Every structure is written in C-alpha cells, then in structure tokens.
Image (tube, rainbow, N blue to C red):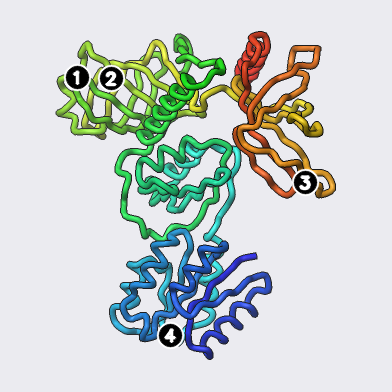
C-alpha cells in the first residue's frame, strides 16, 4: 500500500485533497500535516511514497521549511501546489519539487503526476547483485535515482545523477568515505528510489576509481582483522591467466582506469575495440599531444577494470595515439592478465541440509545455502510461526553436515557474524573458526571446480 502525505492547513482544501486521493485509489494510505516540520516527523517514523505540499499560504512565503523537507528526504518525490506568485513555482522546482502545479488545481493533472511519481518512488528491490555491479549498470544507462542500501541495522544512501555517483551517506560518513563503506557491505537489500537532486556533488572521481579504492580499503581492513584474529584464514592470492590464444575478459564499452608512468593522477577511458592477440583500442582520456612521449616507451601503462565480480589488471605498451576521426589509443595486447576477487573469498550457492547447535539450546534444522572458504550462510525456515530461540552476534555455534566429496558427517565450529530475520525465515552469516585443513582443502577444491564449470 502506497502512502501519501498531504501538507495543508486550510480545512476545506485539506478535506478536498484527501477525498480526491482516497476516491482515486482505494489501496492508498493518506496522512495529513498542517505544515512541513510536522510532515518531516511523520516521514521519519514510517515509509512515505509521495508528498503533496500547498505553498500558496502565507506561512510558506520563505520556502525554507519546504527546502528542509526536500533536503531531508531527497528520495521521496514531492508535488508543490502554488498560486501564480511569480518566483514561487520556479523556486520550488529549484528546491526539489518534482512538479509545481498552479492553484486552483486541475485534478486530472494532479492525479496523473501523482501516479507517475508513485510508480517511480520505489522502482524495485534488489537482492543478490553486488552494489558495484548495480552502480555500473546505472552508469551505462545514465539513470538518476537513489540507492537505499540496507544491511542488518545499517542503512546507507547512494545518489546517482544521470549515471554518475555524486554522493553517499551513512549514519556517520558522507561523500567518498560513505561510498567506500557501503560498497564493502555484503548480504544487502537494495531499494531503487527517487532522487530529487537535492544533494550537492560530493564525489568527483570516476565510478571505477571509487570501486577500486573501496576494494583496496576493504583489503586493508581484512588484513588488520586477520592479524588480530587467532583463527587461521585462507588468503586468496592474486590470480594470473595467460591470454595466449584467448580473448581477454573485456567487453566493448567497459570503463578502464589508466595509470600512466610519472603521473600521479588516474584517468578513465572506455574500451572501444580489440584485435585479439594484436592490440586494444580505447578512448583517449587527455589530449593526444600529451601522449607523444609515451608512444613506444619502455614504461608500460597499468590498466584496471571491474568485470563479473573481479578487479582485473594488466600492463600494456602504448603503440599509437590518433586524433582523427576520434582521439583513440592503440594499446599492446597483454600476454598475461591478473585479477583479484572483489569478495574476500570465493563463494558458491549450495544446498546442504545440516543441524545448527548452540550450547545448552535445542538443535535447529536448516540448510547451508552459501559457502566460502571462510564461512557460509545458514537458512532456517520458521515453522507454524514459532519463533527461534534468541541468537546473539558473536555466539559460538556448531554445524553438523555432509560436505561435497566427504561421506562422513563433519563438525564445523563457527561464530555468528550477522543475521537477517524475516517473517518466514532467518538467515545467519557464519564465520568458520579453526577450520580443519582437510575441510578447508575440500571446500577450496569444490569452489574452484564450480568456477571452472561456469
């Protein structure tokens, strides 16, 4: 059910607007407020999909409260109503109104715009797609929206304008720091919401640079955590692949990050062509004249990009820079290419019936549905609405299960690291503790066999 907040302090007009919306759609929840600050309180306490605000009253002459509302909730569309008072309609649009309609309001026009905005207020919910992949899709499609990213008790917002990531916010961080943090979150639920433009640009770097930096910082955090932990973790090294007789995993239109020798800045380019085992063609990120000293030089350009959940990189020599018919770079086809997994460990979807044990608690029955070398995701279906016993974070647990390739039941010790509780099921993120070497080898071989089959 969609929720609409109507801001109006004239009783007659308020009654007319409420009746209009309730008659228009029965499956709609209409809330009312006499002024913008009261509406902000309502919107802070529950989900709201649309605001209709009357700006024609004397109290709204400054538009400051309206501006406060649209800035506080940039992901909720707002229709402003105003008499033709010169600057107010134009100023309302500048301050975040999606539409500003002149009073007396044409009801058909109001409902048409309301319907469009309610459809776009939340255009979808995404699970299972990495945040960086979704951002790259939005960049390619040049979309404008807000990504509301939920993880356990954390919520972050990523603001995308015409495909560019311009801002990010979490509870404690804004800008690049917030973006790096949000991109490191796992097991998230992402809501694609509206964006009214009421955020100044905080992020000026190319998206690929933000993703690379988030990956680097995440790796550093993992190293610190690994040193502090007594548990032995499997660290995946940088992987190397030969390109002899193979097409490298790089698609036309992919965004590349270029690191030039003797230049501190990073540059963004776009892959536009390839002749396998001969050369690659990419757009020139700066004037061709700046490239003359690099053509045929001994020092190589470092090229990085993100593809299918991995950061790929290789070194290449600049063969030629042309400026007609377009400014393009011809780059040596690499003999080898390297990659890091964006996630700290390879993972695979799996279905392993198992029992879940907590000290001095009855055993629980469920399935291991996601597996990596360092942990897994455990799913417990709720039966007949009976709640599970309380499970706290950092609780020590024991899993009993049959792993692929092993005939005997195995016991795996772990620690609860995160939980997601829904009405029908509970998902528990588990970190393995002191995993036995033969089990670590079994899991590793299974994950690599699944990858080679894909």
Instruction: Name the N-terminal-most of marks 1 and 2.
Output: 1
Q: Position of residue 198 (x, y in %)?
A: 36, 60
Labels 1, 3: front one: 3
Q: Position of residue 386 (x, y in %)?
A: 81, 47
The answer to whether residue 250 is visible is no
Assess disc 2: are there few (<14), some (14-19) or many (≥20) residues with their C-alpha within 10 Å of its C-alpha: some
Q: Which residue is mark 4?
A: 103
SS state under label 4: loop
Labels 3, 4: front one: 3
The answer to whether residue 94 is visible is yes
Contact (Cβ within 8 Å) of mark 1 with mark 2:
yes
Assess disc 1: are there few (<14), some (14-19) or many (≥20) residues with their C-alpha within 10 Å of its C-alpha: some
Q: Which residue is mark 1?
A: 294
Q: Which residue is mark 3?
A: 387
The answer for how far apart the CA atoms under marks 1 and 3 are is 66 Å
Q: Nearer the viewer, residue 152 or 110?
A: 152
Q: Residue at x 60, y 74 (%)?
A: 30
């Amino acid at each position: 059910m969609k929720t609409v907040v109507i801001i109006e302090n004239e009783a007659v007009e308020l009654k007319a607007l409420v009746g209009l919306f309730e008659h228009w759609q029965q499956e709609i929840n209409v809330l009312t407020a006499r002024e913008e600050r009261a509406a902000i309180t309502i919107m802070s306490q529950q989900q709201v999909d649309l605001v209709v605000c009357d700006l024609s009253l004397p109290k709204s002459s400054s538009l400051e409260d309206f501006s406060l509302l649209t800035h506080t909730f940039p992901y909720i569309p707002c229709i402003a109503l105003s008499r033709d008072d010169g600057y107010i309609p134009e100023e309302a649009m500048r301050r975040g109104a999606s539409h500003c309609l002149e009073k007396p309001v044409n009801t058909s026009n109001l409902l048409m715009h309301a319907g469009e905005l309610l459809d776009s207020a939340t255009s979808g919910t995404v699970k299972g797609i990495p945040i960086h992949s979704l951002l790259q899709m939005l960049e390619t499609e040049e979309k404008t929206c807000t990504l509301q990213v939920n993880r356990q008790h954390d919520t972050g917002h990523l603001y995308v304008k015409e495909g560019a990531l311009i801002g990010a916010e979490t509870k404690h961080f804004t800008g690049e720091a917030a973006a790096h943090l949000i991109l490191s979150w796992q097991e998230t639920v992402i809501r694609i919401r509206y964006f009214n433009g009421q955020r100044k640009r905080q992020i000026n770097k190319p998206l690929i640079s933000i993703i690379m930096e988030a990956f680097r910082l995440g790796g550093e955090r993992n190293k610190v955590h690994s040193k502090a932990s007594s548990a032995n973790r499997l660290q995946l090294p940088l992987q190397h692949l030969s390109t002899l007789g193979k097409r490298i995993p790089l698609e036309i239109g992919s965004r590349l990050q270029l690191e030039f020798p003797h230049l501190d800045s990073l540059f963004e380019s776009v892959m536009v062509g390839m002749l396998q085992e001969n050369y690659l063609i990419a757009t020139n990120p700066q004037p061709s004249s700046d490239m003359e000293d690099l053509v045929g030089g001994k020092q190589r350009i470092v090229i990085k990009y993100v593809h299918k959940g991995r950061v790929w990189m290789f070194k290449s020599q600049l063969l030629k820079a042309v400026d007609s018919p377009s400014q393009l770079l011809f780059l040596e086809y690499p003999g080898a290419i390297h990659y890091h997994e964006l996630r700290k460990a390879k993972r695979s979807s799996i279905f392993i019936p198992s029992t879940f044990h907590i000290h001095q608690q009855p055993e629980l029955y469920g399935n291991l549905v996601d597996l990596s070398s360092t942990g897994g995701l455990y799913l417990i279906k709720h039966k007949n609405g009976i709640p599970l016993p309380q499970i706290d974070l950092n609780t020590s647990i024991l899993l009993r299960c049959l792993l692929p390739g092993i005939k005997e039941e195995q016991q795996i010790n772990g620690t609860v690291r995160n939980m997601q509780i829904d009405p029908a099921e509970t998902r528990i993120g588990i970190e393995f503790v002191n995993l036995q070497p033969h089990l670590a080898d079994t899991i590793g071989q299974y994950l690599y066999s699944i990858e080679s089959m894909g």
